[in-house]
Amino acid sequence: MTRNRVGYRQNGFILIVVLGAVLVLSGLLFGFNQMTRTRLNTADSFYRMEQTANGARAGLQIALAAIRDTDDIGTDPRFSRLLTGDNQLSLEDTSCSITVIDESGLLNVNHLKGPDGQIDRRCIDQFLRLIDLVNHQERNDRKRIGYGIVPCIIDWIDSDDEVTHLPFVQRENTGAESSHYKMRPPSYPCRNRPLDTVGDLLGVKGITPEVMNRLRPYLTCVGDGRININAAPKLVIESLSEQMDGALAQMILNQRRLRPFENPAQLRSLPGMTDNVYRAIKDRIVIRPTEQFYRVTSQAGMADRKCVVEALLQRNTQAGTVDIILYREM
């Protein structure tokens, strides 16, 4: 009996050791399996992320080729869908949408103050009218955009530290310099130089993300300050003069869809275009800008992944190239 008990104890000990070894090996295998799955999922996620990013980059290359291969993408019917954003492409498992905006048709906020340090009254008046038009066209429950952002933008982009006051504006006519921004949490200095992108306006007093979204379609920070009448949105055209109403602005849009304007004098033949209106806008408009800038947004998506590429392009007519001035990938 004693020998049998000893044998049973030895066998039981061996069994416990074997079971322990099995449990340890099972834990190691389970951990290895989990680690392998995690790495595979990470690799697959990275692959899908890169595939989506490559789709967005491919959309930018399509826009680059279109701008390079035509004298004016805004007047070329082959690329009209790029300007409307109604342009969906399928790239393997990725869908891509491309939008091209001709910056020459937008109001250049860097020109609110001239290189001589003097404010540009005509540009400021146009901006004030544009604010009125944006406020008027949107729902009544949205907060009104105030005139105060205009002097604040002037102080944001000029090089001095003197607060701007616009005496021809009755309310909200005072800007903000570094003394204001240093008191904000967190504090930061006033920019005091021209904008690189319109997105730089988000630091300006009074410009919230909502205000930015409402004004962004009508503003630029490149070009010579004149408005390309063949590319401008309706509200920008309407803001050119107090005498320009919505009906005349719409008539300009309708006419350029049929046939783009070849010279400013063709505007005079439009019904409702009086001599007073034409004289008020002729120095503010252009047909063929000497500098051509385009803002491209290429967005690609696949399953739960999305990538957006934004770029500012400049067309070099002499070299026949298109240069990327700014690039951002999100």
Image: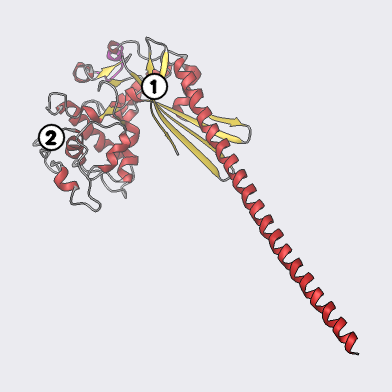
Q: For residue 160, which numbered disc appears in the image? A: 2
Three-letter amino acid code at the position of disc 2: Asp
Q: Position of residue 295 (x, y in %)?
A: 39, 28
Q: Which residue is mark 1?
A: 254
Mark closer to the observer (1, 2): 2
> Can you say whether 221 is above or below 287 in the image?
below
Q: Give the Cα distance between marks 1 and 2.
A: 44 Å
What residue is rendered at 47% in x and 25% in y?
82
Q: For residue 128, which numbered disc appears in the image? A: none
Which type of secondary structure does the marked residue at label 2 adopt? loop
Q: How is the image coloured?
A: secondary structure
Left or right placement of residue 211 versus residue 55 in this view: left
Q: Position of residue 291 (x, y in %)?
A: 32, 17
Which type of secondary structure does the marked residue at label 1 adopt? helix
Nearer to me, 159 or 82: 159
**Residue 118: quadrant of the picture:** top left
Q: Position of residue 133 (x, y in %)?
A: 27, 36
What residue is rendered at 34% in x and 21% in y?
252
Image: magenta residue range: 266-273
Q: Earlier in the sequence, mark 1 or mark 2?
A: 2
Residue lying furthest front in this view? 3
**Residue 244: quadrant of the picture:** top left
Question: Which class describes the residues within 10 Å of circle 1: few (<14), some (14-19), or many (20+)?
Answer: few
Three-letter amino acid code at the position of disc 1: Asn
Nearer to me, 14 or 267: 14
Nearer to me, 114 or 283: 114
Q: Position of residue 65 (x, y in %)?
A: 49, 19
